[in-house]
Image (cartoon, grey):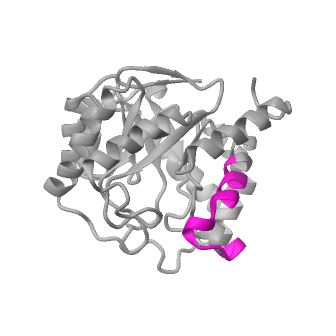
Amino acid sequence: MIWQTTRFRIDLALPKVMGIVNVTPDSFSDGGVHADTRRAIEHCERLLAEGADMLDIGGESTRPGAQAVPVDEELARVLPVLDAAIMLGCPVSVDSRHAAVMRAVLDRGADIINDINALQAPGALAVVAAHPSSGVCLMHMRGSPESMQERPEYDDVLAEVGDFLRERSAYVQQFGVVRERIVLDPGIGFGKSVAHNLALLARQAELLALGHPLLVGWSRKSTLGAITGRGVTQRGPASLAAALAALQGGARIVRVHDVAATVDALKVWRAAGLGPR
């Protein structure tokens, strides 16, 4: 259970917490809060102080209905924060689906590319393959952020998500991206209904057969709002419950907004003997 990244070989024997750093004005959960570079850097420092194991910096909102951001604008948002985050001594991921952004951040020293499009954009796979030790997260998404929530349909969501991730992992490995560099994400909320997301959580352990660590992001998602009736900023307890359920189902990395609360929840979960120690 090692994730090979640019500067770190991350031991996933114990689950890891990935702290979200949105440097966008329009993210569904905290749009604009950390769009200022100074505030974003302070947020990186705060998340690490709260116990985050790694950071995930995103310069383009991928909420349902979001429009694509020009590459130059995405880079202007991401690069100054990335430069500062790299100096903090932790693994740094960049959440992007654009090959030009991937190239720029990897050249700058980013450890991980977190791609909602699983390296399917033109040139994306070649960029990642050209950086022989960088980590990558391949995610399942039906459609695009602009259209993904327009009546998503599956015959068997677990089978279809699993088949896509299996095929995509095998394909990128053909181009030299070795297995140790790859983690997989089922894509909660990306082209899926509430029922689909809950089925993925209930049967998540079946995805372990793919042979890769799982990274899962339930934090503040709309499915939690549909279940609880809570607004985005009130979904902290539901996010914790979903994160623990995902870990119980075998996930090794949880991507979250509320790092301190998640770290505390993991401590209790492990102290009770329910998780790896």
Q: Magenta residues: mostly which secondary structure?
A: helix
Quadrant in which the C terminus appears: top right
Number of numbered labels in the structure image: 0
* Residue at 22%, 46% in the rendered image: 101
Q: Report if residue 235 lies within the magenta region.
A: yes
Nearest the camera: 42 or 237?
Answer: 42
In the displayed structure image, the side of residue 36 where residue 90 appears, left or right: right
Q: Is residue 125 visible?
A: yes
Q: Position of residue 62 (x, y in %)?
A: 38, 63
Residue, far right: 272
The relative height of residue 59 versus residue 46 in the rendered view (above or below) is below
Q: Report if residue 23 lies within the magenta region.
A: no
Q: Quadrant of residue 111?
A: top left
Nearest the camera: 51 or 141?
Answer: 51
In the displayed structure image, the side of residue 36 where residue 12 appears, left or right: right
Q: Quadrant of residue 159?
A: bottom right
* Residue at 59%, 26% in the rendered image: 12
Which residues are drawn in magenta? 226-243
In the displayed structure image, the side of residue 91 where residue 235 appears, left or right: right
Residue, far left: 72
Q: Position of residue 28 (x, y in %)?
A: 44, 67
Quadrant in which the N terminus appears: top right
The relative height of residue 15 versus residue 191 in the rendered view (above or below) is above
* Residue at 46%, 33% in the rendered image: 182
Q: Is residue 170 visible?
A: no
* Residue at 38%, 33% in the rendered image: 92
Q: Position of residue 265 (x, y in %)?
A: 72, 42
Nearest the camera: 51 or 124?
Answer: 51
